[in-house]
Amino acid sequence: MPQKSTTAVTGARVVLERVVDADSGDVFSIVQADQTGHLTTHPVPNDLNRYYSASYHGDRHGFTARYCDWRRLRIVRSWLASASPKWLDVGCGDGTLIDSARRQRWSVYGVERFPELARKRGLTVFGSLDEAGAEGPFDCVTLWHVLEHLTEPQQDLETIHSLLKPGGVLIIAVPDAGSWVARWFGRHWLHWDVPRHLHHFSARSLGGLLATAGFEAQQLRRSEYEYDLLGFAQSTLNWLGFAPNTFFKLLTKRRVQQPTWLKLTNFVLGGWLCAVAAIPVGLCGLRGHGGTLIFFARRRDL
């Protein structure tokens, strides 16, 4: 595990250096600006859009997509009293999750940087939170691995507060930058995902952010099983020196420009690592030591 640097970057401490974007090969640092554990990516590119390829938002979960949608829909339903709630999914991607809810007669809406894929499903998807305000207030707002992508998370959480009904539910999932897997794998951890992930949260830093934005955190889970399992397998391959994130790209049907034998090697080793780690990763998650934070919070009147 790499040692932490004390180099200053505009008043911040460099925690990790030479964190590589697996797509462009560009190199970034992870820096800490305060004592809450909130980390940021440095430098922030002037044009973030070029780091989101055309395939980024489609089929992000590979063969686990149906399971992921089923699990998340079940989680949302368990926190809502209404049988047909009004739900806004921020960062809805291609819209598969809210499309499943629409079939159950929920009133569903999305927000997405690139909304075209979701709109092709006939879904109402906005290009910004401000646009979504016209359909509010909502019973529930979700951000599944989205908050880390936003340039101003504090400001966006305050906007979401205004979009929720009194007592409305906010559900946020983010990679846990304070987890043992993040510390163990260092710059090789899959879920740094620089520079698309601009912010990196611990339970302490995200809990503080929610409180400042007017939310009362009511529950915290520390695992999304498929994220944690894939994170362990791919991070191990990265640490072993394979081309970054090749196994992940193969699973999510992205183009990989490598010889067939090398792609096959990544696929076989990655599958073997998933099989070997399946039970230990599951047990870690059950004991609260997974690599993902899921906060459940309710709007508090300011």
Image (spheres, rainbow, N blue to C red):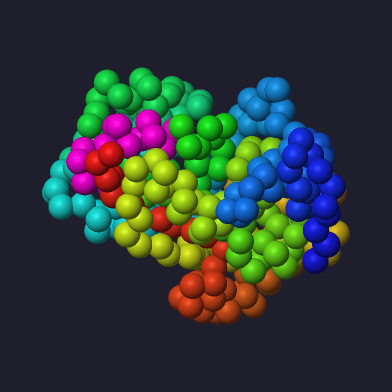
- Residue 174 as seen in the image, left or right of residue 179: left
| Closest to the observer, 299 or 98 | 299
| Closest to the observer, 107 or 268 | 107
The residue that appears at 53% across and 53% down in the rendered structure is 205
Where is residue 132 drawn, in percent x and y?
33, 25
Q: Is residue 253 visible?
A: no
Q: Image quadrant of residue 217?
A: bottom left
The residue that appears at 49% across and 72% down in the rendered structure is 288
Q: Is residue 165 magenta?
A: yes
- Residue 6 as seen in the image, left or right of residue 273: right
Q: Is residue 137 visible?
A: yes
Where is residue 8 drawn, in percent x and y?
81, 43
Q: Which span is picked out in magenta?
A: 156-170
Q: Quadrant of the C terminus?
A: top left
Where is residue 282 drawn, in percent x and y?
51, 74
Picture layout, residue 71 above or below residue 257: below
Picture layout, residue 150 above or below residue 258: above
Q: Quadrant of the N terminus?
A: bottom right
The residue that appears at 74% across and 63% down in the rendered structure is 185
Q: Is residue 3 magenta?
A: no
Where is residue 197 drawn, in percent x and y?
62, 41
Q: Image quadrant of residue 186?
A: bottom right
- Residue 182 as seen in the image, left or right of residue 244: left
- Residue 224 as seen in the image, left or right of residue 162: right
Picture layout, residue 271 above or below residue 152: below
